[in-house]
């Protein structure tokens, strides 16, 4: 165990530093064009060489002027950060578990146990489980919308100033008057996000019925993104808003490309499991899992907030077949993330003395209405009523349902080789098509 701890410290010391420019800043840069320094700033219509009056249109879309535009950008960056940090961590116990009776170790399980679910058996007093796993995935969709085809619509500031009604002959409190308030910016995003997590886990049997453990991931997040923005003018006779060019030759199109990666410590997990009942056929245990915000939120390596998970574990054993069920609650301290009800059902099957099959249905069901909200549709009243949807991303619940299938192979040296795949069964949240995991575990 001391060697494992020293090795872990060496890995942390050698972990590459995060990129100089943080990934969250790079996402934000997808909304900055030309010589502007603010998101959605139109440098062309702020050029002092353009006619008087046109210069004033440069800041009409920036988040400080239009709160819904800021909310849309915040939603996107927050959704990426909170979901990247939510990586799976392997179970606290694995392999054959023991209980000491009259000083003699007696096996309490037949199979090697589940991979990402939990079973009620504890390791046994004085026993240690160490492991390292590598998980790799590429995010493909956000609430069912492909990440390479996200469309965002940014609307104009509702301009109303003293004398506006008399100048434009109407009620300037209505969106759409003056007429240039009908202009909007249409943006297409193409995002490619790869994540690799190398997780080190260690569990120690403090007592026969009490395990304590720690899990520390080293995360690498790679980002490539492209944005293409188009000013959609309401009238063709005059362009009041443009990215570059002049009043007589405006450029209504702009694009931006960003690329970067970051590597560092993810969110540290500290875990404890207590076996409550230990009947021959059915067993029950309670697990507490605290995750600390040790990963960089700005580089999409951690959530940025403390989280606490409490789970009740019921498992049974019928020869080589061992079903289990987990039911719990996930508390998240962040203001933009929801708590969740956790429910997992599955089984592990001993196929041979050296091979175990593990199958699970894993769900995370959102509690309450979304804290991370998209802005509502914008209603333009003048010169006629119409609505603009801010995004193709729906305002739906972020319930997560996954299927997990894996195998554990016990070698003659006592090391378990683990392979696993997790597939999403619904399209909520930020999702990959599959999460591949390979791991090594050793118990002694």
Image (cartoon, rainbow, N blue to C red):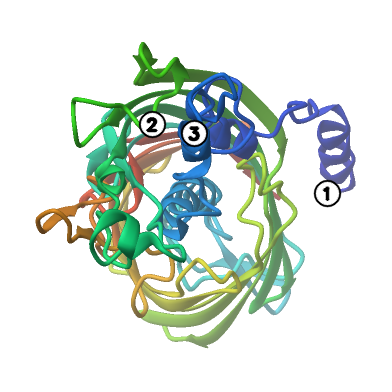
| Mark with earlier residue (3, 2) | 3
For marks 1 and 3, give the CA distance.
Answer: 49 Å
Report the residue marked by disc 2.
241
Q: In the displayed orientation, state which residue is furthest to the front.
A: 166
Report the residue marked by disc 1.
1
For marks 3 and 2, give the CA distance.
Answer: 16 Å
Closer-to-camera residue (381/355): 381
Which type of secondary structure does the marked residue at label 2 adopt? loop
Which type of secondary structure does the marked residue at label 3 adopt? loop
For image coordinates 32% across by 33% down, the residue present is 147
Task: Please say whether residue 363 is visible from this viewpoint.
Answer: no
For image coordinates 28% across by 63% down, the residue present is 376
Q: In the rendered view, would you say 153 is above or below 122?
A: above
User: Image check: 295 left or right of 76?
Assistant: right
Task: Please say whether residue 400 is visible from this viewpoint.
Answer: yes
Which type of secondary structure does the marked residue at label 1 adopt? loop
The reply to whether the C-beta atoms of the residues labelled 3 and 2 are less than 8 Å apart is no
User: Image check: 226 left or right of 207?
Assistant: left
Q: In the rendered view, would you say 246 is above or below 129?
A: above
**Which of the labelled discs sits on residue 31, or is there none?**
3
Closer-to-camera residue (156/437): 156
Q: Where is residue 194 in the image (x, y as percent from the top left)?
A: 48, 28
């Amino acid at each position: 165990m001391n060697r494992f701890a020293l090795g872990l410290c060496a890995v942390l010391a050698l972990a590459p530093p995060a990129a100089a420019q943080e990934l969250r800043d790079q996402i934000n840069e997808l909304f900055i064009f030309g010589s502007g320094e603010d998101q959605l700033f139109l440098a062309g219509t702020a050029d002092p060489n353009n006619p008087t009056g046109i210069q004033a249109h440069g800041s009409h879309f920036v988040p400080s002027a239009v709160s819904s535009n800021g909310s849309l950008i915040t939603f996107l960056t927050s959704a990426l950060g909170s979901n990247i940090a939510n990586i799976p961590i392997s179970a606290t116990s694995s392999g054959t578990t023991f209980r000491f009776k009259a000083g003699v170790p007696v096996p309490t399980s037949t199979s090697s146990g589940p991979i990402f679910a939990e079973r009620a058996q504890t390791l046994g007093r004085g026993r240690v489980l160490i492991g390292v796993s590598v998980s790799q995935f590429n995010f493909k969709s956000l609430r069912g919308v492909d990440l390479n085809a996200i469309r965002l619509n940014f609307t104009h500031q509702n301009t109303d100033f003293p004398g506006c009604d008399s100048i434009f002959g109407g009620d300037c409190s209505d969106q759409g008057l003056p007429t240039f308030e009908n202009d909007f910016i249409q943006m297409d995003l193409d995002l490619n996000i790869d994540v690799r997590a190398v997780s080190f886990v260690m569990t120690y049997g403090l007592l026969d019925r009490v395990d304590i453990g720690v899990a520390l991931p080293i995360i690498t997040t790679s980002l490539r993104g492209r944005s293409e923005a188009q000013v959609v003018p309401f009238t063709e006779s005059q362009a009041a808003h443009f990215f570059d060019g002049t009043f007589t030759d405006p450029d209504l199109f702009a694009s931006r490309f960003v690329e970067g990666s970051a590597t560092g410590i993810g969110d540290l997990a500290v875990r404890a499991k207590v076996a409550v009942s230990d009947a021959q056929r059915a067993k029950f245990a309670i697990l507490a899992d605290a995750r600390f915000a040790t990963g960089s939120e700005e580089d999409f390596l951690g959530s940025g907030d403390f989280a606490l998970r409490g789970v009740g574990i019921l498992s049974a054993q019928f020869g080589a077949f061992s079903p289990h069920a987990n039911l719990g609650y996930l508390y998240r301290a962040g203001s933009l993330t929801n708590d969740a009800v956790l429910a997992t059902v599955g089984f592990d099957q001993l196929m041979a003395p050296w091979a175990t099959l593990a199958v699970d249905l894993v769900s995370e069901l959102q509690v309450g209405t979304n804290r991370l909200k998209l802005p509502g549709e914008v209603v333009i009243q003048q010169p006629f009523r119409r609505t603009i949807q801010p995004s193709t991303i729906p305002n739906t619940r972020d319930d997560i349902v996954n299927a997990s299938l894996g195998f554990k192979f016990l070698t003659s040296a006592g090391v378990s080789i683990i392979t696993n795949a997790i597939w999403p069964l619904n399209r909520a949240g930020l999702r990959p098509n599959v999460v591949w995991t390979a791991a090594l575990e050793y118990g002694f």
